[in-house]
Amino acid sequence: MPSDTPEKAAPKPRATRSKTAGTTTKKKAAPKAVTTTDLMPAPVPVPAPVTAPVAPDPVVVTPATVLKKKELIERVSKAAGGKKKDVKEIVEATLAVLGDALSKGEELNLPPLGRAKVNRQKDLASGEMMVLKLRRAPEKPADDSSVKKQRKETLAEAED
């Protein structure tokens, strides 16, 4: 009389190759043992408690201040101790040379400012638009340089 439950067929023996002889031998696989864990249903995962996502701390963006040419001239004349009229000509010439170099796609290496490179450049009807990449070196502490200058000055003195 046929049974209602299907019987599992025994697995077919697998053919393997011997590494040394190059011949094929058949090995019989041992039947798989049925364990109690095979008969039990799979455990249902318990969902973790739902928590509200934590938002990262907001980044505080301060509005950028714009340094205009007039303010730049004032700062340079103050730092250099020169007349504004003389400094104005030098600053305007410097800005013109820097603008021409960037328009030509040249990379600028100006140690106090950093290294500037044109990433993208586009000609518009109103002018030229450039996207620059500026890499700056970290500032060195002022104390070390003043100590080195004092050492050099003391080494340069002649003895009597």
Image (cartoon, rainbow, N blue to C red):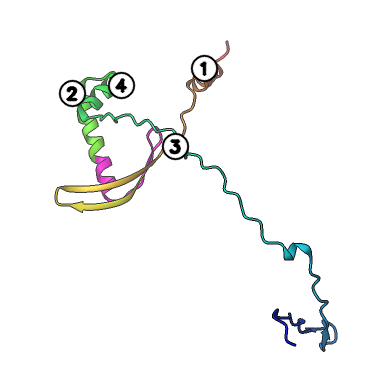
Residues drawn in magenta: 97-116
Q: CA distance from mark 1 to mark 2?
A: 35 Å
According to the image, label 1 marks what residue? 150
Label 4 packing within 10 angstroms: few (<14), some (14-19), many (20+): few
Mark nearer the N terminus (1 vs 2) = 2
Q: Is residue 4 magenta?
A: no
Label 1 packing within 10 angstroms: few (<14), some (14-19), many (20+): few
Q: Quadrant of residue 84?
A: top left
Q: Which x, y percent locates residue 127?
A: 17, 47
Of the residues shown, which amino acid type is indicated by label 3?
Answer: Ala
Q: Which x, y percent locates residue 96?
A: 22, 39
Q: Of residues 122 and 51, which is closer to you in this image?
A: 51
According to the image, label 3 marks what residue? 55
According to the image, label 4 marks what residue? 80
Of the residues shown, which amino acid type is indicated by label 1?
Answer: Gln
Marks 2 and 4: CB-CB under 8 Å? no
Is 82 situated above or below 133? above
Of the residues shown, which amino acid type is indicated by label 2?
Answer: Lys
Q: Quadrant of residue 70?
A: top left
Label 2 packing within 10 angstroms: few (<14), some (14-19), many (20+): few
Outermost top residue: 160
Q: CA distance from mark 4 to mark 1?
A: 22 Å
Mark nearer the N terminus (2 vs 4) = 4
Is 43 situated above or below 13? above
Q: Secondary structure at mark 4?
A: helix
